[in-house]
Image (cartoon, grey):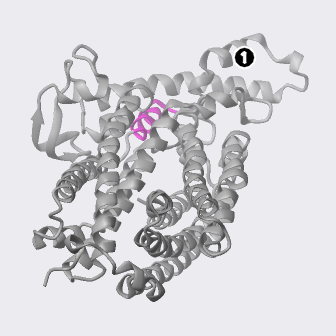
Amino acid sequence: MELDIVALSRLQFAVTALYHFLFVPLTLGLSVLIAIMETVYVMTGRHIWRQMTKFWGTLFGINFVIGVATGLVMEFQFGMNWSYYSHYVGDIFGAPLAIEGLMAFFLEATFVGLFFFGWDRMSKVGHLIATWCVAAGSNLSALWILIANGWMQNPVGSAFNPQTMRMEVTDFFEVLFNPVAQAKFVHTVSAGYVTASVFVLGVSAWYLYNHRNVALAKRSMTVAASFGLASALSVVVLGDESGYLSTEHQKMKLAAIEAMWKTEPAPAAFTLFGFPDQKTRETHFAVKVPWVMGLIGTRSLTTEIPGIEDLVNRAKDRIRQGISAYDAVQQIRAASDPAAVPQAARDALEKNGNDLGYALLLKRYVDDPRKATDAQIEQAAWDTVPGVLPLFWSFRIMVGLGFFFIALMATFFYLSARRKLDHYPWLLRLAVFAIPLPWIAAEFGWVVAEFGRQPWIIEGILPTAAAVSSLGATTVLLTLLGFIALYTILFIIEMGLMVRSVRAGPQPDDEPEAILVSPSLAPAE
């Protein structure tokens, strides 16, 4: 990929997003887990649950602060690196982000202060409410951000205005209840819950393996395994729902994920293993499971899933129809009086307006899409195919890890129910080594969602190449290197603080009461 302004801007946003998403899942999940722990404390009055809430809350606070610092940069990138995107869809995309800041982030940030400094200044119930508000704020932030992102994947409730050359809201509730956004929200927060559950499970397993803070560790593992099992199951179920919606709204992404070069008779097979080759348009050493893809993607035995080559041919037709819409837009904009716009131009825009974005794909090859040659149309049509190999394997690694989390959580849930959490040291070591795996799965999930959408920044509406700001490549490259350096430093700082807090364990002033536990929870001699 040439390091032009488009590639560099994409790389810069990808780097900042991937760094930021290292902190988001843990914030989402830990906020709920500490709220559950404090609820048990308020209901039972047992001091060990207060100790647990404060200890895990400290780790939540470290992660929250770094997450905020990395997230702020992304907000400014929309205007600085993607100014035409902001102009084109700002009326729609800006609203959920503004609501996220005003409603969710302020709620979360306000009650975070009460959580940390209100222990001796508020009643038990009052502090519990503050803790649940932190959890609600965290999850509401994710909701509004994913509503904005879901609209980029499935642009509903909006219409193009040829006079202003902008997308405008026609139905805010359709944007709000976009099925893609709702599925992405529940799938993403469930993944965050799994991340936090594996983190709590792994840290607690390390304590238990080393016979430290045994009471806290066993109770934390019980909560994490129970919450994590339910979350891991929901991730798989809701991931299936996202795949089904892709069949309706993002057919090319689904075909690329499955390396499905040609349309197969229904129901299509699922490619379990293989090495897709985008140049030869075939998958080497493919191992296929009959019928499975058809059942997952369409939930039927008779509905076809179109292959990449068929979808490219459809894209060619849509590009040609989009050229007609582009010509109509130019006539409308050139008219000095709206009444002077030819009726034929209005009819052409009405008929082919949904394909206007496909004509803009030609901007990469020709300034005026109306002058595009057949060869350029062919090139633009093949541009609608994202990178098949990275998508193919990113998806399979993500799914494989998802099933591993179900097995891990189910195992520890069973051991917790049998009170045998400390009977298998090798399982405790496995839980410790599993701590980074949810982040790997989450990052691969982000790659599937966002890389799979290329070449569109807004599916079928605005190509990524047309959305960037008029900046110099050197400027973007230097800021990219600066962000990498800064974010790496922040990541190292967070890891250092986390490791130090885990090694230190619970606060000393909580220890006297915390060690009064039943013999069954005492460390082995």
Decide which of 48, 496 is in the foreground and name it.
48
Picture residue at 63% right of the left edge, 75% below the top: 120
**Quarter of the image that includes the C terminus:** bottom left
Q: Which amino acid does label 1 sit on?
A: Ala
Residue 203, image x, y percentages: 31, 73
Q: For residue 157, say whether it is visible.
A: no
Q: In which quarter of the image is residue 437?
A: bottom left
Picture residue at 62% right of the left edge, 27% below the top: 174
Residue 43, image x, y percentages: 48, 57
Q: Is the magenta stretch mostly helix, strand or loop?
A: helix
Picture residue at 51% right of the left edge, 28% below the top: 319
Picture residue at 48% right of the left edge, 87% below the top: 509
437 drawn magenta: no
Q: What stretch is highlighted in magenta?
A: 372-384
The residue pinned by badge 1 equals 345
Q: Is residue 522 above or below residue 420?
A: below
For label 1, the SS is helix
Q: In which quarter of the image is residue 304?
A: top left
Residue 489, image x, y percentages: 49, 83
